[in-house]
Image: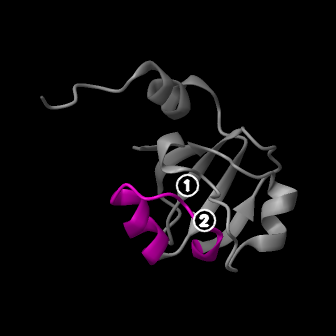
Amino acid sequence: MPKKGLAARERWIAFGTKPKGRISVDDGAKEALLNGKSLLSVGITVLEGNFETGDIVSVIDRESSEFARGKAGLSSKQLDKVKGSRYDKEIIHRDNIVIL
């Protein structure tokens, strides 16, 4: 049976709170997210704002268009140290991402 609408948790991630920051990603990371994958640090190019683990953040592409929102797996301070590199933890798990 096809999925209808967003679950309550997904609505909260997408629309229930103002994002605390923005994560810019490269084209490969955007494609992975659109295909249901988690966000990894290697695909992150720029961070904006200060956020903590568990905060909602916007995910934007090269053209600065927001295409997703998700629950951050690391704070902005932690993420700044690992962005663009290979890191073994998902930055935003696929279960915590909503494509807009």
Residue 82 in the image, given as x and y percentages of width and height = 77, 72
Residue located farthest toward the left when viewing the structure as drawn: 1
Question: Magenta region's main secondary structure?
Answer: helix
Q: Which residues are magenta?
A: 27-43
In the depicted structure, whether residue 13 falls above or below residue 60: above
Residue 21 in the image, given as x and y percentages of width and height = 71, 48
Indicate the quadrant containing the N terminus: top left, top right, bottom left or bottom right: top left
Q: Residue at x 36, y 58 (%)?
A: 34
Residue tagged 1: 59
Mark 1 residue element: strand
Indicate the quadrant containing the C terminus: top left, top right, bottom left or bottom right: top left
Left or right of 80? Residue 26 is left
Q: Nearer the viewer, residue 19 or 1?
A: 1
Q: Earlier in the sequence, mark 1 or mark 2?
A: 2
Mark 2 residue element: strand
Q: Which mark is residue 33?
A: none
Residue tagged 2: 24
Measured in 3D between alpha carbons, the distance from the residue under mark 1 to the one under mark 2, in whole angstroms, is: 6 Å
Q: Nearer the viewer, residue 84 or 58?
A: 84
Q: Is residue 40 magenta?
A: yes
Left or right of 7? Residue 49 is right
Crowding around mark 1 (Cα neighbors within 10 Å: few <14, some 14 to 19, many 20+) is many
